[in-house]
Image: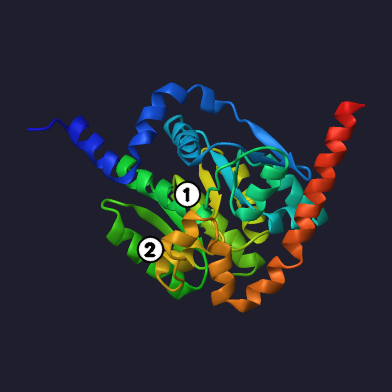
């Protein structure tokens, strides 16, 4: 008969890549030291997927809170114009590169960075919470969507303990009540799907009251977890073309990407050239 420890390890093997464990012991101390690269004034972490998971797991084990940002070009653009939002982005303890725009920007700066889709990263954290008995909270989206997302997550992960659920439709007065409810229930990890910058501002306020909690802004992930929105086929995701698939399916997204993405990359090129020129001088 297998010991409880062996059984737990077997379960972890099923939901986490084997490379996760090969990395864990070797990197555990090094990963507590972030390596970041600035893009237009905003720091982006250079972890790969598994390293980022290890970083968060270590914080959970040590009962240390953090704010995780799944940063993309649109958020950097908003942060450049909105001082409060920009400050919150740069105060986040983990800023993972989410999307082809950030990957291309880092490529321009000579860094070959792995893209970390926020929806996949958060699903991995949920699997970890289920196995390690960390409670979670879900805030955001329509009532139907967040309830469906919770139901599907319960079906997918045995022993997942969702202790708080609330939709994303509330005014300033209701927000005070919701923050107080979350503080009292104290889920260990809170996933907030209000869209940027609202979700990051919401998290920033809660973080002051809950310094031992992990907070993640997840954008439209609840729509995916509820089954209302389908992910791109795997081939698109492997090629880094999920954005193209989503644009084909939702043509309205085109206005968000063009000319915003090309202009963002032009700004990154100009910044990179300037940095190189300063180094030469």
Which residue in the rendered view is the most extreme toward the right? 281
Q: Quadrant of residue 12?
A: top left
Left or right relative to 82: residue 174: left
What residue does disc 2 label?
Answer: 150
Q: Where is residue 181 shown, x and y percent of the image?
A: 50, 56
Left or right relative to 249: residue 79: right
Tell me: residue 213, above or below residue 224. above
In three-dimensional space, the C-alpha distance between marks 1 and 2, rounded to whole angstroms, equals 17 Å
Q: Nearer the viewer, residue 84 or 77?
A: 77
Q: Secondary structure at mark 2?
A: helix
Residue 168 appearing in the image: no
**Residue at image location 48% in from the left, 58% down from the top:** 237
Tell me: residue 90, above or below residue 240. above
Left or right relative to 160: residue 278: right
Tell me: residue 192, above or below residue 66. below
Residue 155 appearing in the image: yes
Q: Where is residue 141 shown, x and y percent of the image?
A: 52, 69
């Amino acid at each position: 008969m297998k010991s409880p420890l062996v059984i737990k390890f077997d379960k972890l093997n099923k939901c986490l890549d084997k490379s996760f464990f090969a990395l864990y012991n070797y990197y555990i101390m090094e990963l507590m030291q972030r390596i970041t690269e600035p893009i237009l004034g905003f720091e982006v972490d250079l972890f790969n997927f598994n390293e980022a998971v290890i970083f968060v797991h270590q914080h959970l084990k040590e009962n240390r809170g953090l704010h995780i940002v799944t940063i993309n070009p649109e958020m950097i653009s908003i942060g450049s114009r909105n001082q409060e939002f920009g400050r919150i982005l740069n105060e986040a303890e983990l800023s993972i590169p989410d999307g082809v725009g950030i990957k291309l920007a880092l490529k321009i700066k000579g860094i070959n960075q792995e893209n970390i889709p926020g929806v996949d990263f958060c699903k991995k954290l949920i699997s970890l919470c289920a196995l390690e008995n960390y409670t979670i909270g879900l805030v955001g989206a329509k009532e139907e969507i967040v309830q469906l997302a919770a139901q599907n997550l319960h079906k997918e992960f045995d022993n997942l303990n969702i202790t708080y659920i609330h939709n994303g439709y509330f005014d300033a007065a209701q927000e005070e009540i919701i923050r107080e409810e979350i503080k009292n229930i104290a889920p260990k990890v809170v996933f907030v799907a209000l869209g940027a910058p609202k979700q990051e501002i919401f998290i920033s306020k809660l973080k002051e009251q809950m310094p031992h909690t992990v907070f993640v802004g997840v954008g439209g992930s609840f729509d995916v977890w509820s089954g209302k929105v389908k992910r791109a086929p795997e081939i698109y995701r492997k090629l880094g073309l999920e954005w193209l698939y989503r644009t084909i399916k939702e043509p309205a997204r085109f206005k968000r990407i063009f000319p915003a993405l090309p202009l963002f990359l032009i700004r990154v090129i100009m910044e990179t050239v300037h940095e190189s020129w300063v180094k030469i001088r």
